[in-house]
Amino acid sequence: MVKNYVTPGEAARILGVCDRTLRYWEEQGKIKAIRTAGGQRRYDITTYTTGVRFVTTRSF
């Protein structure tokens, strides 16, 4: 399976949430992000597009 890592802004746009929501979900342990060598977050969007779209309609 190919990983498709995107920035928080790109992930937020794709998922229809704000980037702060992504950080909150990460703090709560609901999603995971990898960190680049510079410490920036990247999300594997293929992991979350189906699950998060479903769950955001059901109070993730």
Image (spheres, rainbow, N blue to C red):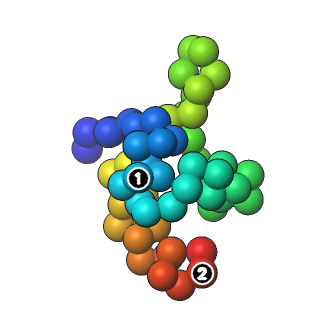
Instruction: State the residue lying farthest toward the bottom.
Output: 58
On the rendered image, what quadrant is the N terminus found in? Answer: top left
**Lateral position of residue 53 relative to residue 35, left or right:** left
On the rendered image, what quadrant is the C terminus found in? Answer: bottom right
Which element carries disc 2, helix, strand or loop? loop
Instruction: State the residue lying farthest toward the top.
Output: 37
Which element carries disc 1, helix, strand or loop? helix
Residue sitting at x 36%, y 55%: 14
**Lateral position of residue 49 relative to residue 1, left or right:** right
Dot 1, crowdedness within 10 Å: few (<14), some or many (≥20)?
A: few
Select label 1 or label 2 by which is in front: 1
Query: Does residue 52 lie above or below 59 as drawn?
Result: above
**Can residue 40 be seen in the rendering of this structure?**
yes
Residue to which mark 2 is pinned? 59
Amino acid type at mark 1: Arg
Query: Does residue 52 lie above or below 1 as drawn?
Result: below
Residue to which mark 1 is pinned? 13
Report x, y in % for residue 31.
Answer: 58, 55
Report x, y in % for residue 17.
Answer: 51, 61
Amino acid type at mark 2: Ser
Tell which of 12 and 31 is nearer to you: 12
Instruction: State the residue lying farthest toward the left.
Output: 1
Q: CA distance from mark 1 to mark 2?
A: 18 Å
| Residue 31: assigned label | none
